[in-house]
Image (spheres, grey):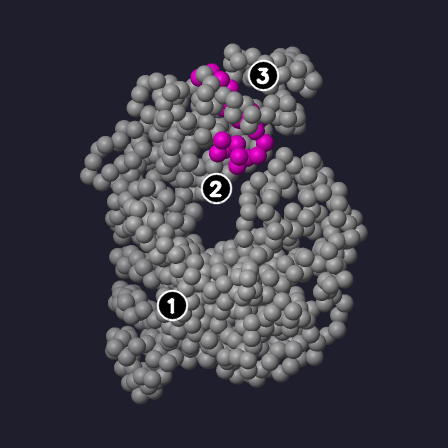
């Protein structure tokens, strides 16, 4: 048994480190001798003795080669903040040779320098623990290593593999995608390099390659840098040289189509699958996946599945045909004529090649033929028995009924329910530890936003919070990575700032400028009037003057503005609101549709929100006689005021992906739980983005309030439900379906209002172009509930 080598004490390491810092000729190997065997806690302590920033400032630009290597090694061996270390290491390794403005990879000297810097970095990382290594690799600053320094990505990958670690962050996978040598269609260039890369790193064909298929958009040109044809060339080469790759590739392509990706980000998998020219037998082996793809939203995915299933329809087994017929009912609810025509052809092929299923196909056609467009009904009737076809023809709906569509749900007229009086679950914080346990999840968007009044109240009466080491580290990391942000994010930053402000000595750099939500009252200092939007000239990239619209945004006391007012009660906790606002809604709502051109567009902002707006307009619900709230308007009255929605629409729409937006909407839903229609109207700006944005935060709180309300819902609430049936994210559609079912189960669903709103949206006035197929998918699971839901436009 090898005897354990005694390790020097922390004091001894610190003394030796100070001696090395006095020498300009010390090598990174000598630093490594001092740090070998040090624990993470010891490294954190030693980092206070050796200031990495001061060392970098001292050596990185004017120092010798060895001194620069010392910077690289110590940054890797002692660095504490993952993001900062990742970016700093990239800068150090990529920085030019002494006397050079830029580093040129083409010279032998540069290649040698890269090798030395890589060696120093990997030596520094070699003794960091798994938790630190994982955090380091997860940070975005690391991802560029694959793009700029592919050999370094390989070494990081090998380090993870040796430790039994895996990683699926976009940063790491991007490094993999860009580290693979390029292949080009019709060329053998880099062929041997690609084969060598995968033979030397076989684990990438088991993990990283297929993890890329789970990260939306990563294989598209914008991230990979490769044309679709070149990606296909790479896969053709890999199938020729690695057993089992082709079968796995076809399967992973189909699995990727089943993920909740946008049509744009799914197209690469269509290109790959078709480009591999799957045989009928291969399609037969993937029949279950292809059948599942028929239920997806993108019409291009459904079309591919129909095409591939048609190639193997003769060989389908009994269970496969049974599953296909069941799924066909969902497909026949779609609106795209191309999809409907192909599905009718597929069903016809089943009836011809498997006559025993003729009756099943006939029954399916009888269920769906009458709702088909008139020009497709003859094709459907060819699959029905003559007697049934004639009967269906006489009872076919009118053209007007088919165009306008209908939504059929059991009729019901909701009534105001008696609210059961119950003691609200309010947590009273009694210690700093309890307070921090409640605050940190709220900052991360995983807590309970309805507890904000209690958190603010505790902080108002206990302004100096005791922080343990873990809490200090969390807040310090968040301060470094947050920066000065506006909008919803600023609420969480300001609340965090108020906690750490009394502890200035604990933080190397106390953030400045965390002033809270300020989408401000821009006023003329002389007149006091609000400054209007104005147009200025700015210099374009080619030196030409271009007009730019600058829009001043006013704080109209929407959800974020009101929340900031509550946080400002830290100075006056007696003004905090601890109870939901009583019911005080007005009954007359007006649909307001505003063209995007109505208001000046902020320069270079909200491009996707503008591009995806249905019919180039914004739809919202307002109460006509409301006027913009003033600073003097009482809090409750301002919360129920809808006049500010058009003014803040775009700002609210794009801020909903911030983590703190989830906390904000939980608080706001609690505040307006007795006024669900106002809550819905105020939520419309960010709800309208769910058709193209999957990462909207705070929807669960809105839907939960609507689904369990005791008040009678009106038009704004049904607009929210209607828009969310067309959400891009599957979990949002599922939540919406559950909310509609919950309302129906409680007798609180107004079928007329829901039908009217769905008809309005499906005519194209409220859903973007991707949303309509999703509506049918959301409502389809309700089809078996009390007579069912049938939706056709």
Q: Can see residue 779?
A: no
- The residues tagged by marks 3 and 1 sit, at their Cα atoms, a distance apart of 62 Å
> How far across and how far down the image is residue 423, in percent?
76, 67
In the rendered structure, which disc, 3 or 1, sits on the residue that comes first in sequence?
A: 3
Residue range in magenta is 65-88
| Number of residues whose C-alpha sits closer than 10 Å to that of mark 3, classed few (under 14), some (14–19) or many (20 or more) | some
Circle 3 residue: 21
Location of residue 226 (image quadrant): top left
Magenta stretch: includes residue 77: yes
In the drawing, does residue 617 fall left or right of residue 419? left
The residue at the point 53 percent across, 34 percent down is 84
Location of residue 321 (image quadrant): bottom left
The residue at the point 45 percent across, 71 percent down is 619
Q: Nearer the viewer, mark 1 or mark 2?
A: 1
Circle 2 residue: 169
Main SS, magenta region, reads helix
Q: Residue furthest right?
A: 430
Label drawn at residue 597: 1
- The residues tagged by marks 1 and 2 sit, at their Cα atoms, a distance apart of 39 Å
């Amino acid at each position: 048994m090898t005897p354990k080598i005694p390790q020097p004490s922390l004091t001894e390491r610190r003394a030796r480190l100070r001696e090395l810092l006095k020498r300009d000729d010390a090598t990174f190997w000598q630093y490594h001798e001092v740090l070998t065997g040090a624990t993470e806690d010891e490294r954190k302590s030693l980092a206070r003795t050796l200031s990495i920033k001061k060392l970098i400032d001292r050596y990185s630009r004017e120092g010798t080669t060895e001194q620069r290597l010392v910077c690289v090694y110590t940054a890797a061996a002692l660095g504490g903040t993952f993001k900062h270390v990742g970016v700093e290491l990239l800068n150090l390794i990529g920085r030019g040779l002494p006397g050079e403005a830029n580093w040129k990879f083409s010279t032998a000297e540069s290649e040698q320098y890269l090798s030395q810097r890589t060696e120093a970095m990997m030596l520094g990382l070699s003794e960091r623990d798994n938790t630190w290594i994982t955090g380091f690799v997860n940070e975005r600053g690391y991802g560029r290593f694959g793009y700029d320094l592919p050999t370094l990505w390989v070494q990081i990958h090998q380090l993870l593999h040796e430790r039994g670690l895996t990683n699926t962050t976009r940063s790491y996978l991007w490094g993999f995608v860009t580290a693979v040598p390029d292949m080009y269609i019709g060329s053998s260039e880099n062929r041997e390099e690609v084969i060598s890369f995968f033979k030397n790193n076989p684990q990438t064909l088991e993990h990283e390659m297929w993890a890329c298929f789970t990260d939306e958009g990563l294989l598209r040109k914008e991230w990979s840098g490769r044309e679709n044809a070149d990606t296909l060339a790479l896969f053709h080469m890999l199938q020729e040289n690695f057993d089992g790759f082709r079968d796995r590739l076809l399967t992973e392509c189909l699995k990727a189509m089943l993920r909740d990706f946008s049509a744009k980000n799914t197209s690469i998998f269509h290109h790959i699958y078709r480009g591999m020219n799957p045989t009928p037998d291969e399609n037969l082996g993937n029949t279950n996946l292809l059948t599942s793809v028929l239920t997806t939203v993108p019409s291009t995915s459904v079309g591919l599945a129909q095409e591939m299933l048609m190639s193997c329809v003769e060989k389908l087994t009994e269970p496969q045909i049974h599953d296909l017929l069941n799924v066909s009912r969902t497909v026949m609810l779609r609106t795209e004529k191309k999809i409907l025509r192909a599905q009718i052809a597929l069903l016809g092929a089943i009836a011809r090649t498997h006559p025993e299923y003729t009756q099943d196909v006939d029954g399916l056609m009888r269920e769906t033929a009458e709702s088909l467009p008139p020009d497709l009904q003859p094709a459907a009737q060819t699959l029905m028995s003559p007697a049934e076809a004639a009967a269906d023809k006489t009872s076919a709906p009118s053209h007007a009924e088919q165009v306008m569509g209908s939504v059929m749900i059991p009729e019901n007229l909701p009534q105001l329910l008696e609210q059961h009086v119950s003691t609200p679950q309010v947590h009273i914080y009694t210690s700093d530890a309890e307070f921090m346990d409640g605050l940190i999840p709220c900052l991360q968007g995983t807590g309970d936003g309805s507890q904000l009044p209690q958190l603010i109240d505790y902080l108002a009466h206990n302004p100096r919070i005791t922080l343990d080491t873990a809490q200090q580290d969390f807040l310090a990391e968040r301060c470094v990575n947050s920066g000065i942000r506006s909008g919803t994010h600023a609420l969480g930053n300001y609340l965090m700032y108020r906690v750490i402000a009394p502890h200035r000595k604990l933080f190397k750099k106390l953030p400045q400028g965390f002033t809270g939500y300020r989408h401000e009252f821009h006023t003329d200092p002389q007149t006091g009037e609000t400054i209007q939007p104005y147009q200025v000239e700015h210099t374009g990239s080619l030196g030409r003057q271009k007009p730019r619209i600058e829009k001043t945004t006013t704080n109209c006391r929407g959800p974020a503005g009101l929340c900031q007012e509550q946080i400002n009660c830290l100075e006056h906790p007696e003004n905090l609101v601890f109870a939901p606002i009583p019911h005080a809604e007005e009954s007359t709502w007006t649909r307001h549709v505003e063209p995007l051109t109505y208001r000046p567009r902020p320069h270079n902002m909200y491009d996707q929100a503008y591009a995806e707006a249905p019919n180039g307009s914004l739809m919202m619900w307002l109460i006509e006689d409301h006027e913009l709230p003033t600073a003097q308007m009482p809090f409750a009255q301002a919360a129920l005021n809808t006049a500010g929605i058009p003014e803040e629409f775009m700002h609210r729409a794009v801020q909903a992906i911030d983590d703190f937006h989830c906390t904000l909407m939980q608080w706001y839903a609690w505040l307006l739980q007795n006024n669900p229609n106002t809550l819905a109207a105020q939520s419309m700006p960010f709800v309208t983005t769910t058709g193209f944005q999957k990462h909207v935060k705070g929807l669960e709180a809105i839907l939960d309030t609507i689904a369990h309300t005791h008040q009678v819902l009106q038009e704004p609430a049904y607009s929210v439900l209607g828009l969310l049936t067309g959400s891009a994210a599957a979990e949002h559609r599922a939540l919406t379906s559950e909310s509609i079912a919950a309302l129906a189960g409680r007798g609180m669903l107004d079928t007329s209002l829901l039908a009217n709103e769905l008809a309005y949206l499906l005519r194209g006035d409220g859903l973007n172009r991707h949303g309509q197929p999703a509506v049918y998918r959301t409502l389809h699971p309700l089809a078996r509930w009390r007579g069912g839901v049938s939706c056709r436009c």
